[in-house]
Each structure stands twice: as structure tokens, then as C-alpha cells.
Image (tube, helix red, strand yellow):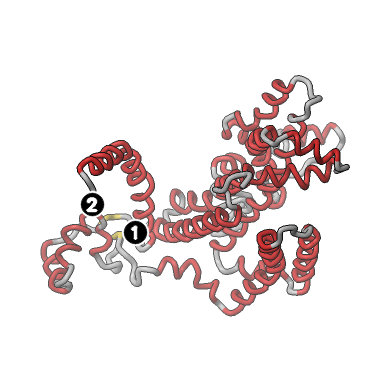
Amino acid sequence: MGVTYRGLSKYLVVLFFIAPTLLGVLMLNVFPILFNVYVSFTNRNTYHYQTYEPLPEERAAFVEEHPALGGFTWDVLCPVMPALCCSPDRMMVYCVREPFYDNYVRLFEDLFAGEALLALAKLVLIVLPLVAVGVAAEQVKKRLLSPPDTSWWWLVAIAAGVALWFLLDGQLALERLFATGNFFVVMFRTILYVICCIPFFFLFGLVMALMLNNEWLRGKGIWRMLVIVPWAVPSYISALIWQFFFRTEQGTINQLLGILGITGPSWLLDPSLAFFAVVLVNIWMSYPFFMVIILGALQSIPQEQYEAAEVDGATWGQQLMKITLPLLRPAVMPAVVLSSISTFQMFNTVWLITQGGPIQGAGVPGATEFVMIHAYKQVFQSRNDGLIGAFAVIVFIILFAATLYSMRITRITKGAYE
């Protein structure tokens, strides 16, 4: 069926209303992504910062060498992306590298050495039991009407992972991969940061929501206001306050320990303690978000289900595992996905507390130098625009794939009571 005049006008009206949004997405999202991909193919850094200015005779030679698309490239693409039109041999000039994927090779060349691949294979084998149990448990829930309890499967998988860690010498494998360059170091620490934060977001949020949802609690409005303060206060204020708490001599924590006769540690100068500090601060500022979501979901669960469970003799723990947590899942999983992405991209909190430190050595990422801090330092301090552009492209692909996978596995777009 063809589009009638009335149908066409309807489409045009819809397009008119969404045009500002489309334009904003194009300018603020699509163009920066494409420009970053373009920069990732160039040699742009501290020593190559000047834009190439073509000469007429060079245009003629370029068009003669590329008769098919030479004119289009020179007249259309070169004014927008001049780095396409010059040789990287030109000193101090910003050009596309030869080969154009050289920045990506520099990121991963040491990772594809024999010892590094063997170390990576060992780490994959160590986490394989957890992945296998996750897939198996999901398939059991899908295919069986009355799925068995699979909680003990996870205990077996964790035990197998720990055994493989010692059997395959996981510590040595990690050190070998850390020696391949900054990419694996930064990615590993960032993923570890996310893994350490997200479960505690949910755990503390669940505990506080269960407490605030208790019908016997008095002054619920006051308690809710106090509990939500860490989330409501601007993050930079909270980060600076916590940074003062963790100082070695003047810090509040060490002063309190001194009153008890205990010498406080150098929180922000020790790699492990600095990592613990930024995890603790992020949990403090983020768990109220989960608490609000879980509290709203708790109040939407029909009370009749708990009453029927009590009649059947179910304990509080059984009600929590069989009723509360399954019905919280549709509300919590989108928050888990979004919080994982935002934690992966954390910058301001960690920067204000540690600035990515403590420093591990020249050219080595700091103990809390996560993805965004590493990108900031490479762009604004080291001026490695081309290399960090390639780094950003890889991170974008990983995040995009992880988001799509999480949406499929968690089924966050499905209704709560289907």
C-alpha cells in the first residue's frame, strides 16, 4: 500500500516533533563517537598536533593517483578530516597512521605473545566454572516447570574456581598479563571495582529497604530522609569530605584511631587501602539509589502472598528467598545494569579522592586509575590522543556488547508478573 497524503503529513508532523531530539543525538552522541574513531586512526599526540594544510599541487597529485574518488576525498572529506590527506612522515603534522590500525596494534601487541595468551587461557579456565553454572542455572529455570534449588551449584563453582586459581597459579598469570601494557591493567582494575561495588549496592539497599518497609517502624519519613542523604548530596562534596576523612595525619579516621592508641595507616598511599577507600565511598553514595528502587518494589508486592506463605508455615528467610527476591528482580535488574555502567565510567569521585593514585611508577597506571581517569590523564596530561582514542573505541565496544548481553540475560524489558 502506498503512503497517502494524510499518512505522509502524519509522518512529517511526527518527524517535526522528534527532529530536535534527533539533531541533539546526532550532535552530542553520534558525531563525537565517529570523530573519536577517526582520531583513533591518527598519530595525534604531543608531537603531532598541527593540522595538515594541503597545497594545490598536492591536490593535483592526489587526484591523479586516485582517479576514482580522489576529487571527492580531497574536496569533501579533507576539509573536515585533514589527517586523511597527508603522510604520517611529515614532522609535527597530524595525519592518519600507516597502517591506519597501528594504534590498536600498539594496545594489544604484547597481549598476543605466547606467554600472555597462555596466562589469559588460565584465567578463563579459572572463571569458567562460574560461567558454566550461570548458564546451566538459567537453562534449568527456563526448561523446567519446577526447577530445583541451584544455590549449592554456585558454592561448588566457587570452590572449583579457587582450586583452579591455586592449581594454575592465577597470581602469576595476572602478573604476566599486567606486563603486557596498560590496557589490561586498567580494564582489570575497573572491572574489579565494579564487581566489588555492585553487590554491596544491592545488599545495603535491600537491608535498608526491608527495615524502612517494616510496619512497626515509627517515624518512617524521618528515617527515609536521613538514609537518602548520601545520594542527595552532590558527589563532589561527599568525595571531598571522605578524602579528608582518609588523610594520614589530619584525617578524622586516623585521629579517632589515635584516641584509642592505634596508629592509623596511610589510607591513600597504600594501593590496597586506597582501592578499599574508593569502593567504600562509592557504596556510601550509591546504596540509597537501590534502597529507593527496592522500597518501591516491596510496596508493590501483594501482601496476600506473604499471608498465604505464613499459613503454609514458611519462615521469614523462605519468604525472602521464594517471594521477595524473585518479585524484586524485574525492578532491581535495570538498576544493576545502569549502576554497573555508571560505576565502570566513574571519574569525579575517584579523582577527587586519589587522582588515580597511589602512583606505581613512571608510565604505570596508579592503583585506582580506572578507565575514565586513565583516559583523562592520557588526553589532558600526556596528550596521547590517537592511542587513547583507540582505547576508547575498544571500551565502547565492550560496554555496548555487555549492555546488550545483560539486557538479554536479565530480561529487563519484560513485565514483572508475566
**Where is mark 1, residue-wise?**
38
Task: Residue 32 in the image: state x and y as whole percent.
Answer: 37, 50
Total marks shown come to 2
Residue 266 quadrant: top right
Q: Amino acid at mark 2?
A: Gly
Q: Amino acid at mark 1?
A: Tyr
Front-most of 49 and 163? 163
Residue closest to the far bottom: 114
Vertical relation: 180 (above or below) 343 = below
Q: CA distance from mark 2 to mark 1?
A: 40 Å
Name the one closer to the observer, 162 or 156. 156
Residue 118 appears at what percent x and percent y?
63, 77
159 horizontally vs 14: left or right:
right
Residue at x 73%, y 23% (from the top left corner): 220
Q: Residue 211 is drawn in which quadrant?
A: top right
Describe the element under mark 2 as helix, strand or loop. Answer: loop
Closer to the observer: label 2 or label 1? 2
Dot 1 falls on a residue whose secondary structure is helix
Residue visible at 22% across and 45% down?
4
Residue under label 2, please give it.
2
Q: Which of marks 1 and 2 precedes in the sequence?
A: 2
Residue 224, compared with residue 402, is above or below; it is: above
Q: Residue at x 70, y 48 (%)?
A: 199
Crowd around label 2: few <14 · some 14–19 · many ≥20 (10 Å): few
Q: Is residue 69 shown above or below 295?
A: below
Image quadrant of residue 191?
Answer: bottom right
Q: Is residue 242 visible?
A: no
Residue 331 visible in the picture: yes
Image location of residue 273, percent across then percent down: 72, 48
> For the point 60% across and 29% down, which residue is it?
232
